[in-house]
Every structure is written in structure tokens, then in C-alpha cells.
Amino acid sequence: MAESSGRKLIVEVCSAKNLMPKDGQGTASAYAIVDFDGQRRRTKTVSRDLNPQWDERLEFIVHDIDSMSLETLEINLYNDKKAGKRSTFLGKVKISGTTFAKSGSETTVFYPLEKRSVFSQIKGELGVKVCYVDEDPPVTDAAGEQKGEAAAKEEEKPPEKAGDGEGEKKDEKVEEKKEEEKKEDENKGKEEEKAKEDNAKPKEEEAPTDTTVAMVDPPPPPPPPAEVENPPISHSEKPKQKEKHGEIQKRHNLIVNDHELQSLSRDRCRSSAYNLVDRMPFLFVRMVKAKRANPEANSTVYAKLVIGTYSVKTKSEIENKDWDQVFAFDKEGLNSTSLEVSLWCEEKKDGEEKITDSSLGTVSFDLQEVPKRVPPDSPLAPQWYTLESENSTGNDVMIAVWIGTQVDEAFQEAWQSDSGGLIPETRAKVYLSPKLWYLRVTVIQTQDLQLGSETEPKVRNPELYVKAQLGAQVFKTGRTSAGSSSSSSSANPTWNEDLIFVAAEPFEPFLVISVEDVSNSKLVGQAKIHVASIERRIDDRTQPKSRWFNLSTEDEKHNNNYTGRIHVRVCLEGGYHVIDEAAHVTSDVRASAKQLAKPPIGLLEVGIRGATNLLPVKTKDGTRGTTDAYVVAKYGPKWVRTRTIMDRFNPRWNEQYTWDVYDPCTVLTIGVFDNGRYKKEEGKPSRDVRLGKIRVRLSTLDTNKVYLNSYSLTVLLPCGAKKMGEVEIAVRFSCSSWLSLMQAYASPILPRMHYVRPFGPAQQDILRNTAMRIVTARLARSEPALGQEVVQFMLDSDTHVWSMRRSKANWFRMVGVLSRVASLARWLDGIRMWAHPPTTVLMHVLLIAIVLCPCLVLPTVFMYAFLILVLGFRYRVRAPQSMDTRVSYVDMVSLDELDEEFDGFPTTRSAEQVRIRYDRVRGLAGRAQTLLGDVAAQGERLEALFSWRDPRATGIFALLCLVASLVFYVLPFKGFVLGAGFYYLRHPRFRDDMPSIPANFFRRLPSLSDQIM
């Protein structure tokens, strides 16, 4: 194994709850075996307890820090059988390395025990605390030699097997054999010590290698097994390995860890698997430095690259200083077959401000002879080229020229011909949303409040409230009175209210809690809490500790005066997922706490290929229209932004990105924008123009299949919907485990805390909008900035605002759902009215079969459902669907309704226009009000049937219930069902055109409509 990295993983096995009894007596004697990176540790056995408590700390060596996140910590629970039988399995827990927290931020997490197989009977939870500690490894040579000699001596000693931690006695014959083996090994050890004196130097060189082997499988301590509470279960060494110890040491350095191979292969696959986009050829020119034959003082040199219509200059540097600049030219846009590189000197004469440029020579390259490079090939080495010049000879320039693709590692930092060069606002970037937490402040009570001053009269019953502020977020509790009586409830106001904030890392420095008096609108006192010191919790099992904080005010001399104290409970809620996007397009459902993170179930790969037929959105030089388009893709906390292709209506990006998928029922959002931020005219902040947006739901994609489609870009403007072009996207959702994918469908969408301690709908909307504003502000502060208008468009931050168009779209969606129920009702009515006699006859036969064989009802229903689903499989939608203009109801909406949707809040329109819109909303609300009243009336009539509100109607219904009970006591139930079915399916000539008697009776029942004023 590799040498120790100086990091240790500490696993504290705390306790277990509600274990399955396995000893046949209703209990279990549980112990845990912990495996990590080839190392195994074991806890003690807790006898006859279904809720065992261990509280044992186990240490493991982390051999490679980089691959620690790829490791898995596995804990298996067993029932200890004293009689020597095989231990019974109680459950297991697997913890991914990505959830390991640094020492100091770890918390106890209870994991549900998993089954080993489908037939295992497992239940319960295991509480574990996992963290890692970085330690500085010793670097002195003397210490290393001493450890090497000690390890060499220990290897010469015979191996002693440690006990199993249970104090079991060994057989006497086995002990006698061990004593004989020890004597033989001691004799061999004496002979080896004599040979060691002659070969001391080679042993010293081999000793450090021995220490690494000993670290993986340490020898057990000499005390007897009964005294060891936590013995490591080490792997026994074979005697053949000791005989050929020298060969093992030589071969050990060539062994590569399995996890290193996996990480290498994964990186290689990700770098080479650029297979969702087309390879775009680029001409790369790396300018390194120049060398002059006759250097001059106070002069700088620069290089000029000329190829066709492109003419680019490098930065000016002094002699023997590197440029180290890379230029990437789009090969398809080149209109020349040669590249010309010239070297120029800038000289400034004494007493003159004018700078003169003089040529030092040129060198030309034929593009047909330029070599090609494809990663993972090594970078092309630059070479010295002699410049051709009539005036100045002997000048050289170091250049590397090759033809590559956008996959080349030099492409991202290179000057790019299709994106305007080295403009920061046009470069491809990856952004990360800030990590968000919910901050819960529970205001409990205040004491010793100093209300009023000596000069001001005291109010008899002042009304107080507590205000908490975190950054720009301000929340207040309800008002309560603080009387002057002797009772504790009036003298010490109590609230017991929760205030929820959204906190983003890095946190705001302080949380300010203040008590204010409503009667005189003055501050009673305030306290500041350092946010970084607030306790964090991941579930509701642990209650954070409440604390008292002193309240104080600042006088004119900037002195803090004590005005009382406040009792609060503050904690950062890590068991929630902070929703920062619209609920119907969420892309991440993971909890804030790292300890609750789960391993990804798949990989999402998106290839942004290009766009076609984009419309111009601005003018260039005041003569023609142009578009500088780029794409933003958002999934989870990761945002990607492609480079901006300048002045093209059919841009080709051909960039590929990947995301880890933790839940298949999430949505990928892709937006196309026109870049307006790279031009800063007259100091005015320019904005990016949106060209359209698409969404792809991952659950609609088949796994390991590439979807290559073109999607229409439609943007909603105040003048109506406008098609801006099409974007070509390739998507692939890869998943290696079908079992993990199926388990995701059975698990809750949000973390556990959302169901144990849920927020109200109104509070959830406030928190969502707050989180959106925080994410927008943080991304707008990036460099280059991701504009506020871009983030808001991607997050759908305006979904909570009233829109007539959205209201109509939702109404027709509901009508579409109810229309299927209406179609079923019409089909049944057609059978009932004998519209198709053969079908009605078949329904009679089916009714008789169901009555005679009622056990076939459910099998028949589910079989029909299965057949319908199988027949509909061939007609399923093959391509993933995106934004639908018909469902969005953008084609049948008036301009005034669109103008109302784009109007801000509060409105900026004229009073007359607002009055017209208000009257329109009143008309729609009146119809909705009537509909709600009709629905409520039906339920009230049913309640009136049992409440004797209409005594005659309720008496008739009671008499009918008595007669029905006597009839059904005599009449078989099958006969009733058969008779009722025949009566329902009777021929139209036996029907009456008027409503039925039960319908007339129900409609005559009273409701509360006549009591509304």
C-alpha cells in the first residue's frame, strides 16, 4: 500500500435503535464490524439489548487523500453467539466518502439498517459519527530509520494472533502447536540476527518500505485477548511471503491501488468521451518568447500574427521575458493557407513621447504542414525559429503551432477568434450557487427589561416585540404586553415563536436580535450573535441548547448600557433542503448537511452543440443586425456558461458538460441569451437579452441513451410570443445501477425534516423568494458576472406573480384533466342508452360474470390496466419534450394581458388602465366565487341529510334506511347488485326524460347559501 498521507478517519459507533431480535429470546447481543480501505475494526459486544450503546472511537489510516471521497465505509452489525456458532446478521450501513466531515463539524447521524439480501429480516437504525483529522507526518530521517529498524525487528518476530474480543478460550492442542512454532521461529530469528550484522546497510535501506507494509496490517499487541476491548481484526500473513521478503519489497512499489486505477480511468473517460458534440478544428499558436541578436535598452518587443483577415498582437514585454500566450483560430473561418508571425520592437527616444515600431523579421507557416494533436497526447514542444529580415538578422522567436480541437487543454485560456479574443465576459465559465442553510431562531422569553428612562414616564402596559435581522432579512414576532404587576408572566414577556432565515455560506457576520417597544417606538435593547458559532443540527432528535444573551443599548458616549436579557434557541437546520427555484422545476433535493448526502445514482451529460436561425436583437455599427449568443445550463448548484460566439446567427459551441445525478425526478434548465455586458457604452450597465429557454425532465429519459434534438426557442415579449430560433442539444443520462434508480422512486422527494417539521405554504414561498434573491446576488458578484436578469429567468423567480395568461393556462389544464373523466362518463352513458347495442349486451354478460364470480373483479381490472399500458407503450413520446406554447397559452392572449404580466410590483401603469384590469379580475373572481359556492352547497346538502335540518327529508331518509336494512337482510347481496345493474342498463323505452327520484330528493335538501349576506 501507499505511504500514510497524515490523515486519519475517526469513526465513532454511538448506538443502535430498535434492532431485530435474533437470539430466540426476544433480544440480541450486538457488535459492529467496521471496514474501510482494507482495514477492519470491531466494537465490543453489548449483551441482550435491542438498543445497544457502544460509544467507541475507531481510527483508520487514510492512505490517499484524493481518493478518500471514492471510498466507502461499511459497518455490519451481528448478533454474538457465545456457543461458537456463526454470528447472525443484524443489518449494515454504507457511508460514502463524500459525506465525511472535518473534525469539529461532525454530528451523530442515524442511518437505517440495510438488508444483505431480499429475504433478510432487518429493522432499526445505527447512530454513527464520522470525521477525519489531518496530522503532520514525521519528516526527520533519523526517526524514519529508527522506525524502519523497529519494523524490521518486529517482522522477524513470530506472528501472534489477537483474540476475537469476546474472551473465548482456545483449545489446548492449538496452544501447544503455537508454542512449538514460537520456539522454531525464535531459533530462526537468532540465525537471522547473526546474518543481519553482516548486512546492516541494505537492511536500513529496506526498512522504510517495511513500515508501509506494517501500517496496513499492524501486529497485534502482546496482552491476552481477554484484556483487549477493541482489538483490530488483522489479516494473517502467509509464511511464504516471509521467506521471499526481499522480492515482495521490490514488487510492492509497482502495485497500484484499485481506487487509483478507478480514478485514473474515470478521468481518462471524462476527458476523452467528448462524444455528444462535434470536434471543431482550431489552429493553435503558442507564443513563448523572443531573442534578439542586438538587444537595446528601454525597448520592448511584441509579436503580430496575421492569417487572412485576422491580425492579432501579443502583449509587449522586455527582452528575455516570456509572453506565454496561446491563440486559437477557428479553422473553418480562415480564408488563408499561411500564417505569418512578425516580431516588432517598440522604442521611445529620449525627449520624445512618440513610440516608434520597427520590424525585426517574419516567419511563415504553411497550414497544410502544421501537425495535428489530439488529447491525451502531450503538449507540443515549442521551437526556435529564425526570423527573416533584410535590416535585422539573427533574431529568433520560440513558437509552437498545431491543429487541435476545443478539447485541447490550452483552449480555455487561449485567445479565441470566434469569441472576441480575451474578453472576460465572453469566456466559458462554471458557477456554483452558494450553499444555503435555514437558520431557526426560537424566541422564548425576556427578563429584567429596563423599560423607559429616568426622564421619560413609564407606560403602564407597554407592548413589546422581538425583531431579528440577518443581513437584509428582517422578521418580527407577535406583540405581547409587559405589565408592571408582580406576576412572572407579565413582568417577563414570553413568545415561544420561531423565526426562519435563509443563510448562505460564507455567512453574514452577526445575527442581530432586538427588543422594541411599540408604544413609544423605541429600542429596548439588542444582542449580536456570531453566526459562525451557531450550533448545527441535522434532524429533530437532538434539541439545540437555549442560551441567554444580554440586551444593551448604546448611549451618546458610545457606552453599552445593560437593559435586560433575552432567552433564545438558535440553530442552523442542516436536515432541510433550501428550495431556491420553482417547485415544479427543481433540480436538487439534497439536504444542506454534508452528513446526509447520498452517493450519486447516475451521470448527466449535456452537449451544447449550436443554434440555428437566430434573430438579430441589436444593431452593429448602426447598419445591420447582429446576435452574440451564449448558453447557460443549470442543474443542481452547478451553472455552466458557454463562450459567446460573436456576430453569428448560426453559432456552433460544441461544448460538453457533466453533472452528478442524485434524483431522477429533477429538471435540467437550458437558456440562450444575447451577450450585452461585454460592451460598456457611456458607463451604463448593459443587460443580456433572453432568446429562449428549454427544460428537460430526467425521468422522461431512457438510461444510457443519447437524445439529439433541436428545440424551438420562444420568448414571451410584451408584444406577444416570438420565435427566436432553434437550439441543438444532446443529452445522455447514464445510470449503472437499476436498483438505485428504482429505490429513488420509492423514497421521499425532500429530506425527512420537511415532513417531520414542515413549513407552511406562505412561509415556504417567502423562504423560496429569499433564497432566489441570495443566489441572484451572489452570482451577480462573480467575475465575470452572471447577470441578474439571467439568473431570474433561469430560476423562474416570477411564478408567484399574478398573470392572466398563467391563470387561463392552469384552468385549461384542469379542464383537460376533468375532460377524461367526462369522456368516461359519456362512454358509460352511451352504454346505458344503448347507443351501441352489442357493447351493452356484452356489459350485461360482464355484469353477470362479476356477480357470480366476484373474486375475478380485481384481477380483471389490473389485467385490463396492464394491457392498456402495454398497448400504449408503442405510442409513447420518443423525444424529451420541452416548453410548449400551446400549453402555455401564449397564442390566445391579448396584448393588455401580456402588458399586465410584464408590469412590475407595484404597478407603474396609469390609474385608468389599472381600473380596467381590476374590473376584469373582478369579473373572473365572481365566476370563480360562484363555482366554489356550488361545490360547497353539495357538501352542505349531504351534511343536512344527517343533521335534521330539514326534519321531513331526514325522516324520509331514516325510514328508507330501516326498510333497506330489512330488505337486505332477506335479499342476497349478489341479487341486489345484479338487479341494480340491469335497472341501470335498461332500454331507453323504459326510461323517463325527467330527473330521477333520488336526484330530485338530493337537490331539495337545504344548504347554507341562503344564510350568506
Image: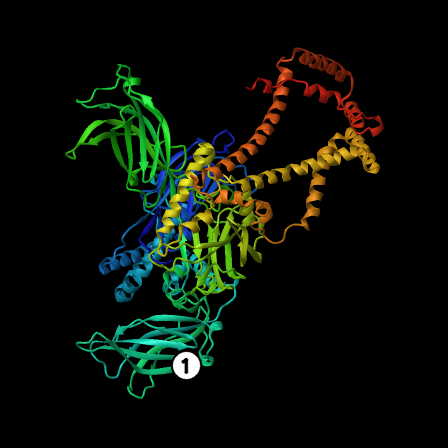
Residue at far front of view:
912
Residue at far bottom of view:
390
Q: Quadrant of residue 547?
A: top left
The relative height of residue 135 versus residue 988 in the rendered view (above or below) is: below
Which quadrant of the rendered structure holds the N terminus?
A: bottom left
Query: Is residue 657 toward the left or the right of residue 300 in the image?
Result: right
Which quadrant of the rendered structure holds the C terminus?
A: top right
| Residue behind mark 1 | 365
Relative depth, front residue between 86 and 811: 811
Relative depth, front residue between 156 and 825: 825
Residue type for callout 1? Phe
Which x, y percent locates residue 224? 34, 42
Relative depth, front residue between 129 and 797: 797
The number of numbered discs placed on residues in the rendered structure image is 1
Number of residues whose C-alpha sits closer than 10 Å to that of mark 1, classed few (under 14), some (14–19) or many (20 or more): some
Which x, y percent locates residue 302? 30, 75
Query: Is residue 411 toward the left or the right of residue 323 in the image?
Result: right
Q: Secondary structure at mark 1?
A: strand
Instruction: For residue 378, say whether it is visible.
Output: no
Which x, y percent locates residue 738? 56, 49
Instruction: For residue 618, say whether it is visible.
Output: yes
